[in-house]
Image (cartoon, rainbow, N blue to C red):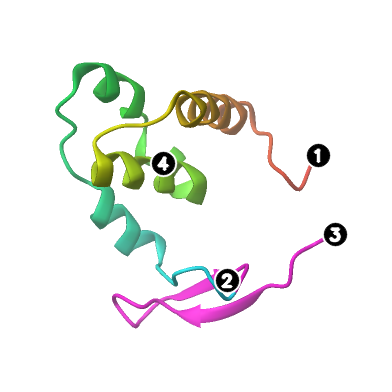
Amino acid sequence: MPRPRFKQKCAMCKEDWVIMYSARQFPICIKCHMKKIDKEVKDPAMKKLLDIPNDLYEKSLFLRKIKEAYLMWDKLSEKQIEAFKKAVKDIKEGKSKEEE
């Protein structure tokens, strides 16, 4: 069942419109979110994992949220790491939720 969608202005820059999937979602545009997650990762293992092209981050809110969680807490669970790898693989192959 498709979720209801509506548009709302970005809460940070107040310029761009963001497609919202739920009322609980924080309205942040891609540009502002990319600025927020564009920080240096110090752990070598995580740096290798999170060092993917920016266009993949721009395509997927899920990938941005995972990196944001790592930058906030300095760790990821095994399930988060597995889901991140699977999402990167799916995006590189061109799969999306709408196709499934």
The quarter of the displayed image where residue 92 is located: top right
Q: How far from the left and from the top, in percent, is residue 24? A: 54, 71
Horizontal side of 33 relative to 94 (left or right) equals left
Mark 1, other Cα within 10 Å: few <14 / some 14–19 / many ≥20: few
Identify residue type, mark 3: Met
Mark 3, other Cα within 10 Å: few <14 / some 14–19 / many ≥20: few
Give the residues in magenta: 1-22
The answer to whether the residue labelled 3 contacts the one labelled 1, judged by CB atoms less than 8 Å apart, is no
Residue labelled with disc 2: 20
| Residue at the (41%, 46%) spot, across then down | 64
Quadrant containing the C terminus is top right
In the picture, the disc for residue 1 is 3
Q: Earlier in the sequence, mark 4 or mark 3?
A: 3
Residue labelled with disc 1: 100
Nearer to the camera, 27 or 76:
76
Q: Earlier in the sequence, mark 3 or mark 2?
A: 3
Identify residue type, mark 1: Glu
| Residue at the (34%, 58%) spot, across then down | 33
Q: Note whether 52 is above or below 69 in the view shown.
A: above
Q: Earlier in the sequence, mark 2 or mark 4?
A: 2
Horizontal side of 17 relative to 99 (left or right) equals left
- The CA distance from mark 3 to mark 2 is 16 Å
Nearer to the camera, 97 or 26:
26
Q: Secondary structure at mark 1?
A: loop
The answer to whether the residue labelled 2 contacts the one labelled 4, judged by CB atoms less than 8 Å apart, is no
- The CA distance from mark 1 to mark 2 is 21 Å
Identify residue type, mark 4: Ile
- The CA distance from mark 2 to mark 4 is 18 Å
Q: Note whether 85 is above or below 53 in the view shown.
A: above
Horizontal side of 95 relative to 16 (left or right) equals right
Instruction: Give the label, 4 or 1, closer to the camera.
Output: 4
In the picture, the disc for residue 66 is 4
